[in-house]
Image: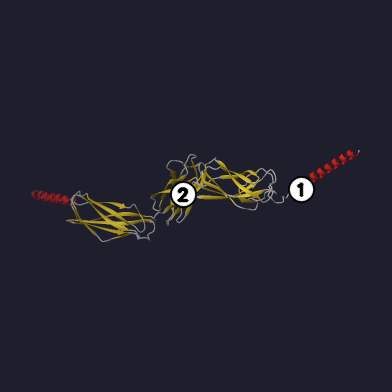
Amino acid sequence: MTVLKSIIIAMSIVLIFSSAAIAAAPVVQITLVTNPITAYPGGDGYIQVNLKNTGTASALNIKATVTPLDTGIVTDQTPINIGGLAVGDSISQTFKFSVPSTTPAGLYRIHIEIRYCQDTGCSDTDQYAIINVQSQQILELTSITPNIVSIGRNTTTKFSVYNSGQTDISNVVLTWQEQNNLILPLGSSNRIVLPIIHANQTFEIPIEMVTSPSITPGAYALNIKMEYTDKSGIKQNISSIAGVIVGGAGDIDISMQEFSGSTITLSIANIGVNPTTSVSITTQDQKDFRILGAQTVFLSNMNPGDSTVATFNVVPLANISQGSGANQGGRTGGFREGAQTLHVTLSYTDTSGFRQSAEKDVKITAGAAVSTGQTQRFGRQDNTVYYFVAILVAVVVIVYAYVRFRRKKE
């Protein structure tokens, strides 16, 4: 019985020491941080490997090896000696990776192997980093056309977005906003959703926008935000600023106000919503008129609703018929026989600072024929009337003379 007790005690001691030996072991935990989250071809990145010994014994001779599992990512695969970690201690080690310029967009795996030892042997633990590679600036806002919008009116514009990458992108969301809400979407939201834009595709988005009637002409910034889901399923965000011009070209009407003798007076009115500056009217010798004196009249500035007159001294080169003097807003031709036109050039500076010019033909009419110092020519119908009147007068004169002659004779 004494021998049996001795054996039991000895085995218990062995088990106790064996359990202690088994329990006293290092446990190295690994966490990874990848920077940047999205990598681009031709760029570099870093993986921060964080190690912590959560075991009950020191970890000795820790070595780390970083190996790409997919072609398209390059790392230094030489094992790095990190040293040792006491129980509860932590340490960090940074590893560099590179993305060649020829790497296509996609997800790439990097294997991180950590080997650590203790007195009784060594252990391995593994972790994997995922590198998200995207084409540089894959979604671009290339243009807004037209980039000039009128005051107080709606304008149909087109936002052109271009997928410059080699893969399709989905769930594209574009939002735009003017900081002071002086330019707003008309009849819709400022949030546009596109299901997909294919690689190397340009997509045009029609947008109705309207400006406030009280807005001041000038350049305004639109804050543009674009969001999409890339090939790896990760959402990407792009912010940019685009400019639009409020104002632009004016709308000036020209008509004949009066034609008397050798003077033509034109009525000029700004019937648009944009102010115009440095307004001038120019004319020159032409088919129906010869211009006397100044050929250009400067009218200074014209705000919306303003009107003024411009006067030219002329010599008519043809008979001017009667009419209402209605304005003709362009070279249309086809005036009725005898009606004449004065061709003028309207010039002004718009709110964008650009010099604008417009050619106009103004219909000129008068209440009577105007002498030009030449033999006046009349239409056949008018000549008949005058001939009839002349003959009638002659007959009356002859009859009157004959009656007087007879009375005197009697």
Label 2 is placed on what type of residue? Pro
Residue at horizontal 85%, vertical 40%?
400
Residue at horizontal 46%, vertical 48%?
194
Q: Residue furthest right?
A: 410
The percent coordinates of residue 156 (x first, y second) are: 52, 46
Look at discs 1 and 2 and give the one toward the viewer.
1
| Along the line of sight, the residue nearer the viewer: 399 or 60 | 399
Q: Does 152 appear above or below 45?
A: above
Q: CA distance from mark 1 to mark 2?
A: 77 Å
Does residue 119 appear to the left or right of 108 in the view shown?
A: left
Residue at horizontal 79%, vertical 45%?
390
The percent coordinates of residue 210 (x first, y second) are: 50, 42
Its colouring scheme is secondary structure
How packed is label 1: few (under 14 Cα within 10 Å), some, or many (20 or more)? few
Label 1 vs 2, first from the N-terminus:
2
| Along the line of sight, the residue nearer the viewer: 104 or 150 | 150
Mark 1 — residue?
383
Does residue 261 appear to the left or right of 270 in the view shown?
A: right
Residue at horizontal 47%, vertical 44%?
217
Does residue 407 appear to the left or right of 380 in the view shown?
A: right
Label 1 is placed on what type of residue? Asn
Q: Is residue 45 visible?
A: yes
| Along the line of sight, the residue nearer the viewer: 63 or 316 | 316
Mark 2 — residue?
195
Q: Does 183 appear above or below 130?
A: above
How packed is label 2: few (under 14 Cα within 10 Å), some, or many (20 or more)? few
Q: Is residue 207 visible?
A: no
Secondary element at image label 1:
helix
* Quarter of the rendering occupied by the C terminus: top right
| Along the line of sight, the residue nearer the viewer: 23 or 346 | 346
